[in-house]
């Protein structure tokens, strides 16, 4: 199983690298998807099968589709790819990369110095996960629920119809009817 | 070694059977549709017109496999493969009989939901890569429809999970020894069936394709065997949803006298034929109506069903 | 919701209805006598060609699928030297039949004229001319009207009075 872990890890790293270097946004998103699937595989191999499938259902199956959805609507053509190419100059990426590389080296040193971590995945069943979430981490779940509630209320607020917009013919008719109504009242 | 051989053989047999059945479903659908429209349907090639499928397949293979010059080539080729692959992967967890299944995952139901959520990509990418406005519109509709109905599909199944106490599909089947879940969870069954039709974008809910408005929608640029993949994918989807309905709500392989596989097949075919009957009888709703059904009717009912089931389970304990 | 279930049920019950399909090659369609199908050239009761080569059919044809060439025999009777209908163009509208003054060209209840070679759909006079009087049995144009062309003498036609002897004083 260890070999499967390393294969999935390599795929994840390679796919993520491709995400950064692609110029076409849809291709980049597709590589991101592959990367997410590889991550799900890693989760599964580490015994967190529930988390693995949630990763696929929520990230790969829903959120990435929405990303692609938006990118499709923007109709990004050759110009964007050109722009991306321009933006991806060494001048731009060298700085962050060097800094990230320093952090990575530090991380590697720490990991290597802490001795060989034995690969012994503890399988977590959905039942255990549920009890953990709703007993020990209940406050966390409730807080997340409140955040989501706020997001839903915000979305409903933005998405609600402000007022009825009538076509000008219908507008005129409506005004006439109102006048009649007023006359009748008088 | 023996174990591996057994599994490989099982996988090959299941794969072969499924693709064969999916192909013959073309014939079945045409005959059944004809039956309900006072016609005969294809009855010339071979006995009962059964060989029409062979003729169709040969035709599809020999058609020009055309990629339009304006299409996004790599994604265009890649998209039809996803649909068949995603559906076939879902069959990994379907228990056809106690000893005929590929993998008895303890998260089988979630695996099915995950794979069916990946099926959206074939529509979205196919429509986008075709670089055609009708295809793009079909892709947009398909994406929003399938994402929405996935939510209700998952939610409607959670009541069953509560009652059986497991995501494992064999456990769900075994939990129906006394009662089928369609008795205890009738609302969930109706919701799941509706969501399943929307997931496979079958006929009352085929708005991503909508021949009359979008000229076949996301696959209007596809031809030859690439179109065939979409076609087979759709029929595999029908089999999958029918099989899942049977597994979850109709006691899977359980049944008297006959061997389990036969029961499973019989029940599945009843639902496949029901799918075809829906195609024969119902008109296509408008796109906004579909979304409204989903979010304003199905979602509240699913949540309410979940709540009531939860309450009952608590009371019983 | 109820209406949806009702329509599903109704459609299901259609399973037990009678089929509307006619199993064509084994079971033929009922074609009525006035059905507009394959065009033929008919003959009069004496076995002579009815067509007098007046070109009215060719003129009436909206798709210009008829072509002919008129000629005369030794009695002065006109007939077509060739008569050609291109059935790959013909739309079976029946205008030629309506235009024909001698009931020569007629449409018949027959549509089974498929060909593998498109050129075979061009019918020549020998393909068109049939040994029958078609829809108007007993009708002979030259016996009703027309100039003397070896079929009838002067004043022998239907509803025709014998010629007046202009040299006689008797009325």
Image (cartoon, coloured by chain):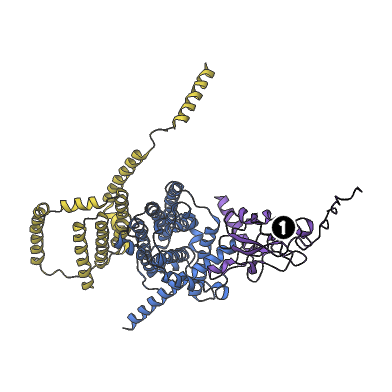
Chain colours: A yellow, B blue, C purple
Q: Position of residue A109 (x, y in %)?
A: 7, 64
Nearer to me, B230 or B238: B230
Q: Position of residue B22 (x, y in %)?
A: 46, 69
In which quadrant is the N terminus of chain A drawn? bottom left
Q: Residue at x 41, y 77 (%)?
A: B13
> Would residue B185 be visible to someone looking at this image?
no
Q: Looking at this rendering, what residue extends furthest in the front direction?
A: C167
Q: Position of residue B41 (x, y in %)?
A: 57, 66
> Would residue A80 be visible to someone looking at this image?
yes
Q: Looking at this rendering, what residue extends furthest in the bottom direction?
A: B2
The mark total stands at 1
Q: Position of residue A123 (x, y in %)?
A: 27, 67
Nearer to me, B29 or C128: C128
In this rendering, the answer to whether B299 lies above or below C140 is above
Q: Is residue A166 left or right of residue A27?
A: right
Nearer to me, B246 or C76: C76
């Amino acid at each position: 199983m260890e070999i499967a872990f390393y294969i999935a890890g390599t795929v994840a790293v390679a796919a993520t690298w491709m995400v950064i270097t692609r110029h076409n946004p849809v291709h980049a998103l597709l590589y991101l998807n592959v990367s997410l699937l590889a991550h799900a595989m890693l989760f599964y191999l580490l015994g967190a099968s529930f988390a693995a499938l949630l990763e696929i259902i929520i990230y790969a199956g829903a959120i990435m589709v929405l990303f692609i959805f938006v990118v499709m609507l923007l109709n990004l053509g050759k110009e964007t790819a050109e722009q991306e190419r321009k933006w991806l100059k060494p001048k731009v990426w060298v700085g962050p990369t060097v800094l990230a590389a320093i952090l990575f080296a530090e991380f590697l040193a720490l990991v290597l110095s802490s001795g060989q971590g034995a690969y012994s995945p503890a399988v977590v069943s959905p039942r255990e996960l549920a009890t953990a979430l709703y007993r020990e981490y209940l406050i966390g779940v409730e807080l997340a629920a409140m955040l989501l509630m706020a997001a839903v209320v915000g979305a409903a607020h933005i998405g609600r119809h402000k007022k009825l917009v009538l076509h000008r013919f219908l507008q005129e008719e409506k005004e006439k009817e109102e006048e009649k109504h007023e006359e009748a009242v008088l | 070694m023996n174990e591996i051989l057994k599994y490989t053989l099982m996988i090959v047999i299941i794969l072969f059977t499924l693709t064969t059945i999916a192909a013959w479903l073309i014939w079945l659908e045409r005959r059944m549709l004809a039956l309900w429209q006072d016609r005969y349907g294809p009855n010339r090639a071979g006995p009962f017109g059964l060989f029409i499928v062979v003729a169709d397949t040969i035709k599809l293979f020999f058609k020009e496999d055309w990629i339009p010059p304006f299409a996004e080539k790599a994604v265009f080729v890649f998209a039809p493969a996803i649909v068949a692959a995603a559906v076939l992967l879902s069959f990994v967890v379907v228990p056809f009989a106690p000893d005929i299944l590929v993998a008895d995952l303890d998260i089988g139901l979630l695996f099915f939901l995950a794979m069916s959520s990946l099926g959206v990509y074939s529509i979205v990418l196919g429509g986008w890569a075709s670089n055609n406005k009708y295809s793009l519109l079909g892709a947009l509709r398909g994406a929003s429809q399938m994402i929405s109905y996935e939510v209700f599909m998952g939610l409607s199944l959670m009541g069953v999970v509560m009652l059986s106490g497991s995501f494992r599909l064999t456990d769900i089947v075994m939990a129906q020894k006394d009662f089928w879940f369609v008795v205890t969870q009738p609302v969930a069954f109706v919701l799941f069936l509706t969501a399943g039709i929307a997931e496979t974008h079958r006929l009352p809910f085929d708005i991503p394709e909508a021949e009359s408005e979008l000229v076949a929608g996301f696959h209007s640029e596809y031809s030859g065997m690439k179109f065939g993949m979409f076609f087979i994918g759709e029929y595999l989807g029908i089999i999958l949803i029918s099989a899942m309905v049977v597994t979850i709500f109709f006691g899977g392989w359980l049944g008297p006298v006959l061997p389990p596989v036969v029961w499973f097949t019989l029940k599945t075919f009843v639902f496949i034929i029901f799918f075809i009957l829906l195609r024969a009888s119902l008109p296509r709703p408008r796109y906004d109506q579909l979304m409204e059904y989903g979010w304003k009717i199905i979602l509240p009912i699913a949540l309410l069903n979940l709540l009531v089931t939860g309450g009952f389970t608590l009371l019983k304990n | 919701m109820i209406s949806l279930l009702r329509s599903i049920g109704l459609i299901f019950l259609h399973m037990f209805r009678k089929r509307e399909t006619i199993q064509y090659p084994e079971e033929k369609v009922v074609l009525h006598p006035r059905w507009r199908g394959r065009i033929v050239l008919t003959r009069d009761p004496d076995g002579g060609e009815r067509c007098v080569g007046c070109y009215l059919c060719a003129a009436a044809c909206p798709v210009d699928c008829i072509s002919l060439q008129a000629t005369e025999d030794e009695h002065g009777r006109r007939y077509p030297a060739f008569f050609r209908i291109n059935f790959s163009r013909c739309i079976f509208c029946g205008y030629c039949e309506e235009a024909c003054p001698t009931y020569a060209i007629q449409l018949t209840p027959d549509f089974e004229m498929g060909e593998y070679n498109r050129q075979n759909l061009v019918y020549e006079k020998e393909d068109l001319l049939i040994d029958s009087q078609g829809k108007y049995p007993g009708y002979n144009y030259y016996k009703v009207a027309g100039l003397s062309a070896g079929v009838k003498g002067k004043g022998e036609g239907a509803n025709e009075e014998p010629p007046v002897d202009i040299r006689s004083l008797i009325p």
